[in-house]
Structures are given as C-alpha cells and as structure tokens.
Image (spheres, grey):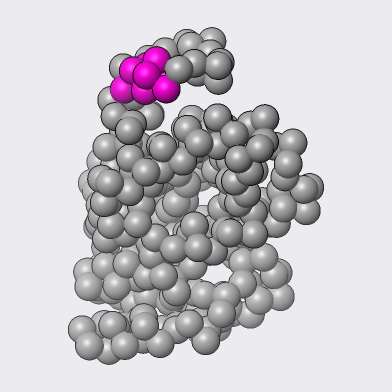
C-alpha cells in the first residue's frame, strides 16, 4: 500500500518516544501528520523539530481516555480531509506483581492502552470502510506476544490489542483496510518515567526474585539501545509495504521472544517461574529466546 502526497496520518501519544519519532518519520515521507498528545504543554519539542525540517505536522489535543477529547480531535482533523493512516501509539506501563496491583491501576492502563485505541479506531473506520482505503497501526509490544510476569496489567492490554488487531484485520480485509500490529521490544523511551506510580520494587516481597529477573530482562534490552526511530521506520514500512503482513516485531529481544515462545510449550515457559538459580534461569532464557541476561 503506497503512501501518497496528500495522505493524512494521525499518530497518538506524540510528546516523546515512539510517537514523536513516528510523527516526524511519516511527515518526512509525504504524510500530512496530525500529532495527538494529551498534554499540549509538552508540544514544543515536536513543534520545533517539525519546523526545523519543514514538515507538515499539526499538533492536536487528544486524550484517548476521553470520548469528548477524542471526538473533538477527530472532528478537527476531518476538516482537513479523510484519515488514511491511524497509528495507535499512546500507552502507559507499570511493573508490579498482580497481588500488589490495585484494581484502579489495571483499569487506568486498559483505559489508555486498549480502550483509547478502540476510540480512535471507531473514529476513523467508517470513512476508511466507505472509501475502501486506510491503514490502522497498533503499537503493541513483545509483551503482547509473551505473557510477562510482574507486568500483568500492561501485558494484558497488549494481548488485548494484539487480539483486536488480528480480528479487526479479518473484519475489514474485504474493505481494503489494512490493520497491522507493530511489536517493539525494550525501546529507549520515557514510558518507564511515565509509569512510576504503577511500578513497585520491594526487596522484602515474596515476589522479589520475579521482580529482579524482570528487571534483568529490561537491562538487557537497554543495553541493546534500540531507539524509537527504529520503531518509526518499521511503522512506515508496515504502511508502505506492497506485501501485507500482520505482525512486525522490532528489536532482537522482540524477535527472540516471539520466535522462542512459539517454539517452546506452555509448561516450559511457566516453569521459568520456579525457584531456579540465576545461572540456570539465565541459561534457559538464552536457550529459549536468544537473549543473554547478566
């Protein structure tokens, strides 16, 4: 599906990270980009970067957790023309065992990561269907491919978004609307800074070994130093590729988790939660997923 010079693209969660990089990348390739962000007080960096490159990027107030905000944003965008590309990127995280995670935090993460995407899809899909043209990109995660302990609410939202993407792709295939899931591994963004309220590390917790191992996985990802621009490039490729593909993992850790989890049975993955020595755990992790922990 080739992009064209007049293509309107909407990207959510653009104040930093993947959304920021994606707004710029799509604009560089001829898209008229509407960059949604909940807090437009954080818009200056993107506005400056767009101006310096002479890019067609318009920043719009868009809080995906609010139906009122979402409706107002898309009403404004439609005045410029039909939306050809929607990138559902807005997301928040958290890292705490299920037993220690309050219900309201589960709901808050779902409200942004899943229901926010649903709101935006429902805003653009009728016109895409009628025009028989459009692409919807869901930025999920490697945690939408592998159920990750210590991050159950976040992982569950990404599984839900993976399900939505796959099922929706089936529903709208006959209307020539493309739906893709882009699955980053650990990316150098501020999502962790934005998720501190839902992240707890307690050295006295009975779940401390799981927390620590989860941290080692992220440490390995940080050492790989995969930048948001790589995800943005993948999103552009998913939009522009003449060949359709549903899933687009990004990063060696995401590729390793995706392929490794499919290659082992459920019980082997669950048994990683046993009281293993660090040496045994690290050996299994590298054997299954090709990622070395330290």
Is residue 199 or residue 228 the one in the foreground? 199
**Rendering coords of residue 96 (x, y %):** 63, 43
**Residue at 58% across / 59% down in the picture?**
196
**Residue at 50% across / 36% down in the picture?**
212
5 magenta-colored: no
Quarter of the picture holding the C terminus:
top left
**Rendering coords of residue 99 (x, y %):** 74, 36
**Rendering coords of residue 8 (x, y %):** 38, 72
**Rendering coords of residue 148 (x, y %):** 53, 33
Q: Can residue 257 be seen in this view?
A: yes
Residue 79's place in the image compared with 30, above or below, is: below
Q: Is residue 196 left or right of residue 258?
A: right
Is residue 32 or residue 221 the one in the foreground? 221
Magenta span dominant secondary structure: helix
Give the magenta part as a residue range: 278-286
**Residue at 55% across / 20% down in the picture?**
273
**Residue at 27% across / 89% down in the picture?**
51
Residue 280's place in the image compared with 188, above or below, is: above
Residue 194's place in the image compared with 207, above or below, is: below
Q: Furthest residue to the front?
A: 204
Q: Furthest residue to the right?
A: 103
Is residue 212 or residue 14 the one in the foreground? 212
Q: Is residue 88 visible?
A: no
């Amino acid at each position: 599906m080739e992009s064209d010079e007049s293509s309107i693209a909407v990207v959510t969660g653009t104040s930093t990270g993947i959304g920021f990089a994606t707004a710029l990348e799509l604009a560089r390739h001829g898209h008229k980009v509407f960059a949604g962000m909940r807090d437009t007080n954080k818009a200056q960096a993107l506005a400056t970067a767009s101006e310096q490159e002479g890019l067609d990027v318009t920043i719009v107030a868009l809080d995906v957790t609010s139906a009122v905000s979402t409706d107002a944003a898309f009403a404004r965008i439609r005045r410029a023309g039909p939306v050809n590309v929607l990138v559902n990127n807005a997301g928040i995280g958290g890292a705490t065992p299920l037993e220690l995670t309050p219900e309201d935090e589960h709901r808050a993460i779902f409200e942004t990561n899943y229901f926010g995407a649903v709101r935006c899809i429902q805003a653009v899909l009728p016109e895409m269907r009628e025009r028989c043209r459009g692409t919807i990109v869901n930025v999920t995660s490697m945690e939408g491919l592998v159920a990750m302990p210590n991050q159950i609410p976040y992982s569950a939202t990404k599984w839900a978004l993976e399900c939505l993407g796959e099922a929706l792709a089936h529903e709208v295939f006959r209307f020539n609307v493309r739906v893709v899931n882009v699955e980053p591994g650990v990316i150098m963004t501020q999502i962790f800074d934005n998720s501190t309220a839902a992240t707890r590390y307690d050295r006295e917790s009975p779940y401390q070994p799981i927390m620590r191992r989860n941290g080692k996985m992220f440490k390995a990802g940080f050492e790989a130093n995969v930048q948001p621009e790589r995800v943005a490039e993948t999103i552009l490729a998913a939009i522009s590729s003449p060949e359709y593909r549903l899933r687009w993992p990004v990063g060696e850790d995401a590729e390793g988790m995706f392929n490794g989890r499919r290659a082992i049975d459920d019980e082997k993955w669950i048994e990683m939660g046993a009281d293993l020595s660090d040496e045994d755990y690290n050996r299994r992790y590298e054997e299954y997923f090709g990622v070395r922990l330290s």
